[in-house]
Amino acid sequence: MAKFVSYLQTKSFRNNLLAAIATVVILLTAAFYSLRYYTKHGQGLNVPAVKGLSFDQAVSKLEEMGLRYQVDSVYMMDMPKGTVIDQDPEANTFVKDNRTIYLTINTAQAPNVKFPDVKFKSFIEAQSIIGSFGLKVGDTVYKADVSRDVVLDVSFGGQAIKPGDIIPKGSKIDMLLGDGRGNEDVDIPTLLGFTKGEAAFSLRGSNLKLGTITYEGNITDSANAVITAQSPVLSDTLTKVKIGTAVNITLSNKKTN
Protein backbone atom coordinates (compact mmCIF):
# COMPACT_ATOMS: atom_id res chain seq x y z
CA MET A 1 0.00 0.00 0.00
CA ALA A 2 2.87 2.34 0.83
CA LYS A 3 4.39 1.72 -2.61
CA PHE A 4 1.07 2.56 -4.31
CA VAL A 5 0.75 5.83 -2.41
CA SER A 6 4.35 6.66 -3.29
CA TYR A 7 3.59 5.97 -6.97
CA LEU A 8 0.67 8.38 -6.91
CA GLN A 9 3.07 11.09 -5.87
CA THR A 10 5.47 10.54 -8.74
CA LYS A 11 5.81 12.70 -11.84
CA SER A 12 5.22 9.68 -14.07
CA PHE A 13 1.76 9.13 -12.62
CA ARG A 14 0.84 12.79 -13.01
CA ASN A 15 1.94 12.76 -16.66
CA ASN A 16 -0.04 9.59 -17.39
CA LEU A 17 -3.13 11.03 -15.67
CA LEU A 18 -2.93 14.28 -17.66
CA ALA A 19 -2.47 12.31 -20.90
CA ALA A 20 -5.53 10.18 -20.12
CA ILE A 21 -7.67 13.27 -19.34
CA ALA A 22 -6.52 14.99 -22.54
CA THR A 23 -7.34 11.88 -24.57
CA VAL A 24 -10.88 11.70 -23.12
CA VAL A 25 -11.47 15.43 -23.78
CA ILE A 26 -10.27 15.09 -27.38
CA LEU A 27 -12.49 12.07 -28.01
CA LEU A 28 -15.56 13.74 -26.51
CA THR A 29 -14.95 16.94 -28.50
CA ALA A 30 -14.52 14.98 -31.72
CA ALA A 31 -17.69 12.98 -31.05
CA PHE A 32 -19.67 16.15 -30.28
CA TYR A 33 -18.70 17.95 -33.46
CA SER A 34 -19.11 14.82 -35.55
CA LEU A 35 -22.65 14.43 -34.24
CA ARG A 36 -23.44 18.07 -34.97
CA TYR A 37 -22.21 17.58 -38.52
CA TYR A 38 -24.09 14.34 -39.01
CA THR A 39 -27.41 15.74 -37.76
CA LYS A 40 -26.82 19.16 -39.39
CA HIS A 41 -27.41 20.83 -36.02
CA GLY A 42 -28.91 24.31 -36.38
CA GLN A 43 -29.85 23.66 -40.01
CA GLY A 44 -33.38 22.89 -41.20
CA LEU A 45 -36.69 24.32 -42.36
CA ASN A 46 -39.91 25.60 -40.89
CA VAL A 47 -42.82 23.57 -42.23
CA PRO A 48 -45.10 25.88 -44.25
CA ALA A 49 -48.82 26.18 -43.53
CA VAL A 50 -50.65 24.28 -46.28
CA LYS A 51 -53.87 23.42 -44.43
CA GLY A 52 -56.79 24.98 -46.28
CA LEU A 53 -54.89 25.23 -49.58
CA SER A 54 -55.77 23.30 -52.69
CA PHE A 55 -53.73 20.14 -53.25
CA ASP A 56 -51.78 21.71 -56.14
CA GLN A 57 -50.94 24.82 -54.10
CA ALA A 58 -49.78 22.72 -51.15
CA VAL A 59 -47.55 20.51 -53.31
CA SER A 60 -45.99 23.53 -55.03
CA LYS A 61 -45.18 25.11 -51.66
CA LEU A 62 -43.60 21.95 -50.26
CA GLU A 63 -41.54 21.22 -53.36
CA GLU A 64 -40.17 24.77 -53.42
CA MET A 65 -38.74 24.14 -49.94
CA GLY A 66 -37.31 20.73 -50.82
CA LEU A 67 -39.82 18.80 -48.74
CA ARG A 68 -41.42 15.52 -49.76
CA TYR A 69 -45.06 14.61 -49.20
CA GLN A 70 -47.41 11.66 -48.86
CA VAL A 71 -51.16 11.89 -49.32
CA ASP A 72 -54.15 10.31 -47.61
CA SER A 73 -57.79 11.21 -48.23
CA VAL A 74 -61.07 11.40 -46.32
CA TYR A 75 -64.53 12.66 -47.20
CA MET A 76 -66.03 15.64 -45.36
CA MET A 77 -69.23 17.00 -46.89
CA ASP A 78 -68.94 20.45 -45.32
CA MET A 79 -65.38 21.08 -46.54
CA PRO A 80 -64.28 22.21 -50.04
CA LYS A 81 -63.33 19.31 -52.27
CA GLY A 82 -59.64 18.79 -53.08
CA THR A 83 -58.32 20.91 -50.22
CA VAL A 84 -55.82 20.02 -47.51
CA ILE A 85 -57.72 19.50 -44.26
CA ASP A 86 -54.77 18.32 -42.16
CA GLN A 87 -50.97 18.18 -42.23
CA ASP A 88 -48.30 16.44 -40.15
CA PRO A 89 -46.01 17.92 -38.91
CA GLU A 90 -47.99 21.08 -38.19
CA ALA A 91 -47.09 24.46 -39.68
CA ASN A 92 -43.95 26.18 -38.29
CA THR A 93 -42.52 22.91 -36.99
CA PHE A 94 -38.70 22.85 -37.41
CA VAL A 95 -37.62 19.88 -39.56
CA LYS A 96 -34.65 18.75 -41.63
CA ASP A 97 -34.70 19.30 -45.36
CA ASN A 98 -36.08 16.45 -47.46
CA ARG A 99 -38.47 15.57 -44.62
CA THR A 100 -41.77 13.91 -45.61
CA ILE A 101 -44.90 15.93 -44.86
CA TYR A 102 -48.12 13.93 -44.56
CA LEU A 103 -51.18 15.58 -46.12
CA THR A 104 -54.86 14.68 -45.67
CA ILE A 105 -57.00 15.73 -48.64
CA ASN A 106 -60.79 16.06 -48.79
CA THR A 107 -61.81 13.77 -51.63
CA ALA A 108 -64.34 15.01 -54.18
CA GLN A 109 -66.39 11.81 -54.33
CA ALA A 110 -68.46 10.70 -51.38
CA PRO A 111 -67.95 7.05 -50.42
CA ASN A 112 -71.02 4.85 -50.28
CA VAL A 113 -72.48 3.45 -47.07
CA LYS A 114 -75.09 0.82 -46.32
CA PHE A 115 -78.22 2.34 -44.86
CA PRO A 116 -78.84 1.11 -41.28
CA ASP A 117 -82.12 -0.15 -39.86
CA VAL A 118 -83.84 2.74 -38.05
CA LYS A 119 -87.50 1.88 -38.62
CA PHE A 120 -89.62 1.82 -35.44
CA LYS A 121 -86.78 3.32 -33.42
CA SER A 122 -87.16 6.59 -31.54
CA PHE A 123 -86.22 9.73 -33.44
CA ILE A 124 -83.30 10.44 -31.10
CA GLU A 125 -81.96 6.89 -31.47
CA ALA A 126 -82.41 6.96 -35.26
CA GLN A 127 -80.65 10.33 -35.47
CA SER A 128 -77.68 8.94 -33.54
CA ILE A 129 -77.52 5.80 -35.70
CA ILE A 130 -77.54 7.53 -39.07
CA GLY A 131 -75.05 10.09 -37.74
CA SER A 132 -72.62 7.27 -36.94
CA PHE A 133 -72.90 6.20 -40.60
CA GLY A 134 -72.01 9.70 -41.84
CA LEU A 135 -75.62 10.51 -42.81
CA LYS A 136 -77.83 13.43 -41.83
CA VAL A 137 -81.47 13.98 -40.92
CA GLY A 138 -83.42 15.79 -43.64
CA ASP A 139 -87.11 16.70 -43.41
CA THR A 140 -89.27 15.27 -40.64
CA VAL A 141 -93.01 14.85 -41.18
CA TYR A 142 -95.49 13.70 -38.54
CA LYS A 143 -98.36 11.28 -39.11
CA ALA A 144 -101.24 10.34 -36.87
CA ASP A 145 -100.06 7.22 -35.07
CA VAL A 146 -100.09 5.78 -31.58
CA SER A 147 -96.27 5.88 -31.48
CA ARG A 148 -94.82 9.23 -30.52
CA ASP A 149 -91.58 10.40 -32.18
CA VAL A 150 -91.01 6.91 -33.60
CA VAL A 151 -89.70 6.42 -37.14
CA LEU A 152 -92.49 4.95 -39.29
CA ASP A 153 -90.78 5.30 -42.66
CA VAL A 154 -87.62 6.76 -44.24
CA SER A 155 -86.82 8.07 -47.70
CA PHE A 156 -83.90 9.49 -49.67
CA GLY A 157 -84.41 11.78 -52.65
CA GLY A 158 -88.15 11.14 -52.52
CA GLN A 159 -87.70 7.36 -52.73
CA ALA A 160 -88.31 4.88 -49.91
CA ILE A 161 -85.15 3.16 -48.70
CA LYS A 162 -84.61 0.03 -46.64
CA PRO A 163 -81.74 -1.35 -44.53
CA GLY A 164 -78.76 -2.37 -46.65
CA ASP A 165 -79.48 0.03 -49.53
CA ILE A 166 -76.32 1.77 -50.79
CA ILE A 167 -76.37 5.56 -50.61
CA PRO A 168 -73.65 8.27 -50.64
CA LYS A 169 -72.16 9.27 -47.33
CA GLY A 170 -73.38 12.68 -46.19
CA SER A 171 -76.87 12.17 -47.68
CA LYS A 172 -79.92 13.65 -45.96
CA ILE A 173 -82.56 11.15 -44.88
CA ASP A 174 -86.21 12.23 -44.63
CA MET A 175 -88.26 10.66 -41.83
CA LEU A 176 -91.95 10.03 -41.25
CA LEU A 177 -92.66 10.07 -37.51
CA GLY A 178 -95.65 9.18 -35.39
CA ASP A 179 -97.30 12.00 -33.44
CA GLY A 180 -98.49 9.78 -30.59
CA ARG A 181 -102.15 10.69 -31.07
CA GLY A 182 -103.22 8.17 -33.69
CA ASN A 183 -105.90 6.59 -31.50
CA GLU A 184 -107.59 9.85 -30.55
CA ASP A 185 -110.89 10.72 -32.17
CA VAL A 186 -112.18 14.26 -32.62
CA ASP A 187 -115.59 15.64 -33.53
CA ILE A 188 -116.20 16.46 -37.17
CA PRO A 189 -116.66 20.22 -37.44
CA THR A 190 -119.37 21.69 -39.65
CA LEU A 191 -117.68 23.94 -42.20
CA LEU A 192 -120.66 24.83 -44.43
CA GLY A 193 -120.79 28.58 -45.01
CA PHE A 194 -117.14 29.06 -43.97
CA THR A 195 -114.54 30.61 -46.24
CA LYS A 196 -111.41 28.59 -46.98
CA GLY A 197 -109.40 30.60 -44.44
CA GLU A 198 -112.03 30.14 -41.73
CA ALA A 199 -112.20 26.42 -42.46
CA ALA A 200 -108.40 26.00 -42.26
CA PHE A 201 -108.38 27.78 -38.89
CA SER A 202 -111.20 25.61 -37.57
CA LEU A 203 -109.55 22.40 -38.76
CA ARG A 204 -106.25 23.28 -37.09
CA GLY A 205 -108.07 23.75 -33.83
CA SER A 206 -109.54 20.28 -34.20
CA ASN A 207 -106.19 18.69 -35.14
CA LEU A 208 -107.51 17.98 -38.61
CA LYS A 209 -106.17 19.19 -41.93
CA LEU A 210 -107.54 20.71 -45.11
CA GLY A 211 -107.78 18.18 -47.91
CA THR A 212 -108.81 18.55 -51.55
CA ILE A 213 -110.47 21.81 -52.60
CA THR A 214 -113.07 21.67 -55.38
CA TYR A 215 -114.48 24.81 -57.00
CA GLU A 216 -118.15 24.92 -58.01
CA GLY A 217 -119.14 27.26 -60.83
CA ASN A 218 -117.25 30.38 -61.85
CA ILE A 219 -115.29 31.58 -58.82
CA THR A 220 -114.75 35.33 -59.08
CA ASP A 221 -113.53 35.88 -55.51
CA SER A 222 -111.84 32.82 -54.01
CA ALA A 223 -111.13 34.57 -50.70
CA ASN A 224 -114.83 35.15 -50.07
CA ALA A 225 -116.11 31.95 -51.66
CA VAL A 226 -117.88 29.77 -49.12
CA ILE A 227 -118.00 26.07 -48.48
CA THR A 228 -121.10 24.38 -49.85
CA ALA A 229 -120.02 20.77 -49.23
CA GLN A 230 -117.48 18.86 -47.17
CA SER A 231 -116.28 15.28 -46.79
CA PRO A 232 -116.41 13.69 -44.31
CA VAL A 233 -119.54 15.47 -43.13
CA LEU A 234 -121.22 15.30 -39.75
CA SER A 235 -124.14 12.88 -39.80
CA ASP A 236 -126.18 10.63 -37.57
CA THR A 237 -123.88 7.71 -38.33
CA LEU A 238 -120.54 9.57 -38.39
CA THR A 239 -119.64 12.10 -35.73
CA LYS A 240 -115.93 11.54 -35.10
CA VAL A 241 -112.73 10.95 -37.11
CA LYS A 242 -109.08 10.25 -36.27
CA ILE A 243 -106.76 13.13 -35.52
CA GLY A 244 -104.96 14.23 -38.67
CA THR A 245 -107.81 13.27 -41.00
CA ALA A 246 -108.07 15.42 -44.15
CA VAL A 247 -111.41 17.14 -44.77
CA ASN A 248 -112.22 17.85 -48.42
CA ILE A 249 -114.29 20.94 -49.25
CA THR A 250 -116.22 22.46 -52.16
CA LEU A 251 -116.15 26.24 -52.62
CA SER A 252 -118.77 28.32 -54.39
CA ASN A 253 -119.80 31.96 -54.76
CA LYS A 254 -123.35 30.91 -53.85
CA LYS A 255 -124.41 31.47 -50.28
CA THR A 256 -125.61 28.44 -48.36
CA ASN A 257 -129.16 28.42 -47.03
Image: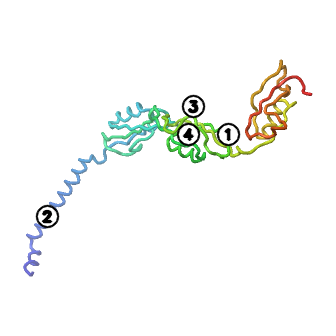
Q: Distance between the residues labelled 2 and 1?
A: 95 Å
Please tell me the numbered disc located at residue 20. Answer: 2
Horizontal and vertical percent position of residue 168: 49, 34
Three-letter amino acid code at the position of disc 3: Gln
Q: Which residue lies furthest to the front in this view?
A: 237
Mark with earlier residue (4, 2) = 2
Q: Distance between the residues labelled 1 and 4?
A: 21 Å
Horizontal and vertical percent position of residue 150: 62, 45
Determine whether the residue tagged by mark 2 lies in a helix, strand or loop.
helix
Q: Distance between the residues labelled 4 and 2?
A: 76 Å
Identity of the residue drawn at 37% across and 42% down: 46
- For disc 1, the marked residue is 143
Q: Residue 21, relative to residue 71: is it above or below?
A: below
Q: Give the mark toward the camera: 2 or 1.
A: 1
Q: Which residue lies furthest to the right in this view?
A: 257
Q: Give the mark toward the camera: 4 or 3.
A: 3
Whether residue 128 sits left or right of residue 44 in the image: it is right
Mark with earlier residue (3, 2) = 2
Q: Give the mark toward the camera: 3 or 2.
A: 3
- For disc 3, the marked residue is 159
Please tell me the numbered disc located at residue 121. Answer: none
Mark with earlier residue (1, 3) = 1
Please tell me the numbered disc located at residue 136. Answer: 4
Q: Residue furthest top?
A: 218
